[in-house]
Image (cartoon, grey):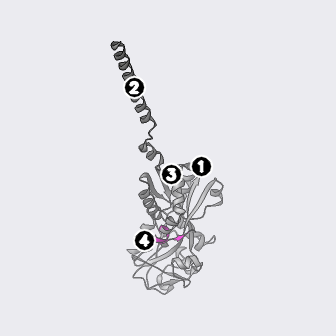
Amino acid sequence: MFKNTKKWMLVFALILTASVVFAGCGNKEETPSTEGEKKEGSLSGSITIAGSTSVQPLSEELAKAFMSKNSGVTINVQGGGSSAGVKAANEGAAEIGASSRELTEEEKGMGITEHKIALDGIAVIVNSKNAVAELTMDQVKDIFSGKITNWKEVGGKDGAISVVNREEGSGTRGAFEELVLGKEAKFTDKALTQPSTGAVRTTVAGDENAVGYISLGSLNEEVKGIKIDGVEPNVDNVVSGSFKISRPFLYLTKGDVNDVTKAYIDFVMSEEGQKIVEESGFISAK
């Protein structure tokens, strides 16, 4: 009798132990993994933005702010010119193309989506030692088309004007040509061509007789932005419409965009993103 009782007590103990072990295993499996949830909820991936060198500095600031909020995201910002940006977006070579001019009718037919992220003026710049502080739109047109070739013709010192131009495909060049030269004039073939906004500014800063044009947001103390028809090249005058040489900054996408690209563009168009646009010297698109 005693032996049987002892035997059943041993069996009961084994059953109880097994139940506790299985229950523990079950509870462990049902416990959610916070590490897994964190990974699933975080934004990660990479974006390439390629195109306009005028938009490039602004994109770099916007990308820096976005990446500081999303450590799993990498944004590569490249130049190449507006036409290169249109091509990159159209062919899928970049998630976002950047353009500092309106798209042509042919480009609009490619099925590209435009996101206007900012507005910008184009400042006509001269060397800081140049006495000329104001030109008419017609004078600017005649200088860049080669009709006016000496500063004394527009109230400056006797000296041959050195015209500094941008390369073919540049959005700044395309916008300037459309807004200033129009269809009836062409750039002088004697102009020095530079591949970027920074290169134009540096060239003009180093040549007392040089004249060029750059994005308003890239204007600094190295050069002098001159009045056009009596109007200063500044943000307020672009917004009011009194400064006539202005253009849009566009991000270009094609087809469905991935979550990271959508989140970045949403950030750029948000109040925080547009504040960065204004702090960078450009004009909010909203």
Residue identified by numbered label 4: 201
Query: Disc 1 and disc 3: Cα gap in Å?
Result: 12 Å
Residue carrying label 2 = 16
Eye-nearest disc, 4 or 1: 1
Q: Amino acid at mark 4?
A: Arg
Q: Which mark is residue 38?
A: none
Q: Quadrant of residue 22?
A: top left
In the rendering, which numbered label is found on residue 260?
3
Q: CA distance from mark 3 to mark 4?
A: 34 Å
Q: Is residue 142 left or right of residue 125?
A: right
Is label 3 in a helix, a strand or a loop?
Answer: helix
**Mark earlier in primary sequence (3, 4):** 4
Q: Which callout, 3 or 4, points to the residue nearer the camera? A: 3
Image coords of residue 160 (percent x, y):
45, 79
In the displayed structure, 45 sits above or below 102; it is above
Q: Amino acid at mark 1?
A: Asp
